[in-house]
Amino acid sequence: MKSAATALCLTLATLLSGTAFAHAGTCATDIAGIENAVRSAASSLARPSGRQTVGAQLGHQPTPQSVMAAQQQAQAGLDATLARAKALDARGQDAECAQAVREARLILGLQ
């Protein structure tokens, strides 16, 4: 099962990274690919995640509330990053948009 999940992540990452070279000069396709990956039922592994906390490193178990808060924070970070990428793309700032797309992929664990 774990190898299937890994294969899915690698496939998504390959597909998403390939679009950057196919459509140089615009991030719209990359942004749409990320949004589709998040929405797709097949990419249930493509969910935003945050950094590991100090409490987790000390062996403290998370509460349901802390897990929900972390998920909401990670989703908000992804949403903000994608909104920034869209704004940069609209202004024609390709390099900055590509950086925002890379950040979104990192949040999703696709890179």
Image (tube, rainbow, N blue to C red):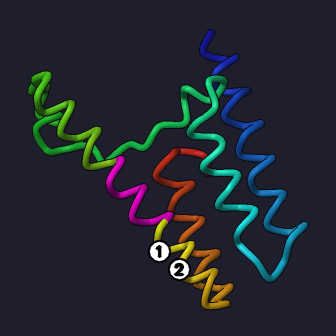
Q: Position of residue 36 (x, y in %)?
A: 66, 43
Give the quadrant of the N terminus: top right
Helix, strand or loop: magenta stretch = helix
Q: Residues within 10 Å of mark 2 (few under 14, many from 20)?
A: few
Q: Residue 21, relative to residue 61: is it above or below?
A: below
Give neighbour class at mark 1: few <14, some 14-19, many 20+ (Cα, 10 Å): some
Three-letter amino acid code of the residue under disc 2: Ala
Q: State the image coordinates of residue 32 (x, y, percent, origin top left).
A: 68, 56
| Residues at marks 2 and 1, CA–CA distance in whole angstroms | 5 Å
- Magenta stretch contains residue 80: yes
Residue 92 lies, in percent from the top left, at 67, 90
When the figure is inspected, residue 35 is found, relative to residue 3, above or below; the finding is: below
Query: Decide: marks 2, 1 in contact (CB < 8 A)?
Result: yes
Q: Is residue 39 left or right of residue 16?
A: left
Is residue 104 rendered to the left or right of residue 62? right
Tally of numbered discs = 2
Judge whether residue 11 can be spotted in this image.
yes
Question: In the image, what residue occupies the spot 32% across and 54% down?
Answer: 76
Which residue does the numbered mark 1 point to in the structure image?
A: 84
Q: Which mark, residue 87?
A: 2
